[in-house]
Amino acid sequence: MGSRCLRNPMFLLGFGIVILMSLSALAAPLLAPYPPNTQHLDDILAPPSSHFLLGTDRLGRDVLSRLLHGGRISLWVGFVAVGISIAIGTTLGLVSGYFRRWTDEIIMRIVDIMLCFPSFFLILSVIAFLEPNLTNIMIVIGLTSWMGVTRLVRAETLSLRERDFVAAARLAGCPTRHILLRHILPNTLAPVLITATLGVAGAILMESSLSFLGLGVQPPTASWGNMLMEGKSVIETAPWLSVYPGLAILITVLGYNLLGESLRDILDPRLT
Amino acid sequence: MADKNRITMTTTSPVYITANTVNLAIKTVKKLLWMLVVLLGITLISFLVIHLAPGSPTDMETTLNPLAGAAARQRLEDLYGLNRPLYVQYADWLFRLLHLDFGNSMSADARPVLTKILERLPLTVSMNLISLLLTLILAIPAGVISAVKQNSPLDRGITLLVFLGFAMPSFWLALLLMLFFGIELQWLPISGIMSMNYAQLDAWGKFCDLAAHLTLPILVYTVGGLAGMSRYMRACMLGALRQDYILTARAKGLSTRAVVWRHALRNALLPVITLLGLSVPGLIGGSVIIESIFALPGLGQLFYAAVMARDYTMIMGNLVLGAVLTLAGNLLADICYGLADPRIRTAGETA
């Protein structure tokens, strides 16, 4: 499998971007030339130069430093939100697929209802009402994105529960919890991993959209979305404020999408 | 009446067809009933979430106004009926909804929610329909070519564009387009829906003015949908090309063109219909962002303002509308699927 990864250019590119972005987010305080909220009042709206590699914003803050720190926020939101949605989705999917009958019926109907929700409307209202902050954003994104995982895990579980090794475990007197967690769950991990990788990309996009509307991460904390929002009002005089944060989002999301799609090719050849 | 005529005219057993029609009717009724349940569930969840969250629609007029005291707040809450138990408020709201009465907006103008929504609906819906049409026109050939010439440089190029499209935040694309076409080249206006001198223009001038204002927003909508649609089209086409009937068609000597565009494409289009139905919530959500960037007076902007003002009745009205549009999209997709696929049309089993 290792060699299949190395021969896949999509995987290499995606993996490279993801590693690079993660490292730069982790090492942001070391890499950033200035603290993200320090104002350089002599250099307000300075264009990119050797002093400020990507220029400064309306308050004289270094754009590169804010980008690096904003990356920590984006990735953190992505991981936690996906963690929540995977936890809910896997649990409901396992239960739904294993117990079938009315349990399955109820859970699948809830999934149907959630899929018909105009979810962006709901996310917007909930976050506006609950004070936009990091925790609320992560929870709300997680709570509105678990349906795909549920369906996936349920489908896997439905076929796995008929396999001989599960029947053997049942005959040997394994408790149900044990069968679900030790025998079925590990076999659903590959598709879940793929969905999780793609989910991180989706969550990062969602967070930046919310921050762009002013309902996400609140200033002065830097996030890629709210940097774009702040840059929009001076787009004619300082276009660099509208270009670089968007480029950061594009590259990061591209990296996770490439990684996810190539993992699908590598781990699960049936699906292509 | 018409059904009876058809039964006597067809050569197959009439009993078989009636049984089938009845089956189909039962299924349709079941489906419609289920959609009602879904709608009820959506309104209940939304109502609870919105009303249980801290804050109130009276905040704008009381807390922010130093002249308004507790008595004024009390009067406003009485006016909106917010001091009643939650289940009474929900039942009341639901009962009014049965008469298509969405209530009055809780903002200062207090106009009926339905009127305000209907004013904004045409712009948002027409922009979405135009961009959906453009998406299909571009995505279907792109997906087909990508699939037919799988792994060629052309396919790789399209795939690369698709991935870029997936990763492109719509608001960033909007900013870049504004920067390039609006500010750099000065070709197109970057905000609003009409110019200052709109009233003085003749009919053709008005049309051109409107078109110029809507070009960039529609472009952003289209790019948003294009990536997903062409990727999906490619996957469906690859699946269709592997089928036995394609081999048969080739074996009887049909040209590649006929095989691809007639036999394979028709079958590959079926799942795309379902995808179109499922894409409605995304389109509605996307309008909030795009309309706020381009300052367009559509549904998304209305909803954003309502959320900011905690205008409960307006938010609920929008959520119901969004849910109804989504369900209608799904139903329409199901119907089209049935019409397009003869297997479902005659068997009526696997819809």
Image (cartoon, rainbow, N blue to C red):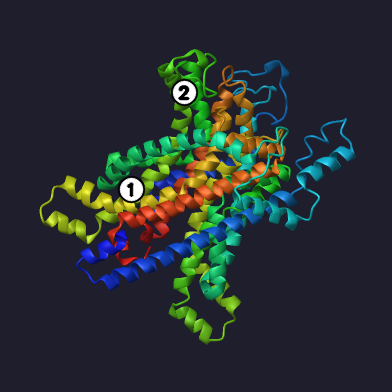
Chain at numbered mark 2: B
Of the 4 image quadrants, the one containing the N terminus of chain A is bottom left
Question: Relative to the observer, which residue lies in front, B193 or A27?
Answer: B193
Residue A243 x/y as whole percent = 54, 27
Label 2 packing within 10 angstroms: few (<14), some (14-19), many (20+): some
Which residue occupies 24% across, 72% down?
B13
The answer, for residue A71, to whether it is visible in the render is no
Residue B156 x/y as whole percent = 33, 41
Of the 4 image quadrants, the one containing the C terminus of chain A is bottom left
Instruction: Report the residue that reaches farthest toward the left.
Output: B253
Q: Label 1 sits on what residue type? A: Arg
Q: Which mark is residue B234?
A: 1
Locate residue B205: give its quadrant: top left
Task: Point out the tag, 2 or 1, that comes first from the N-terminus.
Answer: 2
Chain at numbered mark 1: B
Q: Which mark is residue B210?
A: 2
Q: Is residue B144 above or below residue A187?
A: above
The answer to whether B242 appears left or right of A175 in the picture is left
Label 1 packing within 10 angstroms: few (<14), some (14-19), many (20+): many
Residue B79 x/y as whole percent = 79, 43
Task: Kindly report the distance in space between the C-alpha atoms of the residues bearing marks 2 and 1.
Answer: 35 Å
Which residue occupies 30% across, 57% down?
B341
Q: Is residue A106 above or below residue A176?
A: above
Q: Which mark is residue B284?
A: none
Question: Relative to the observer, which residue lies in front, B237 or B200?
Answer: B200
The answer to whether A94 appears left or right of A136 in the picture is left
Residue B77 x/y as whole percent = 81, 44
Q: Secondary structure at mark 2?
A: helix
Locate residue A90: give its quadrant: bottom right
Q: Label 2 sits on what residue type? A: Leu
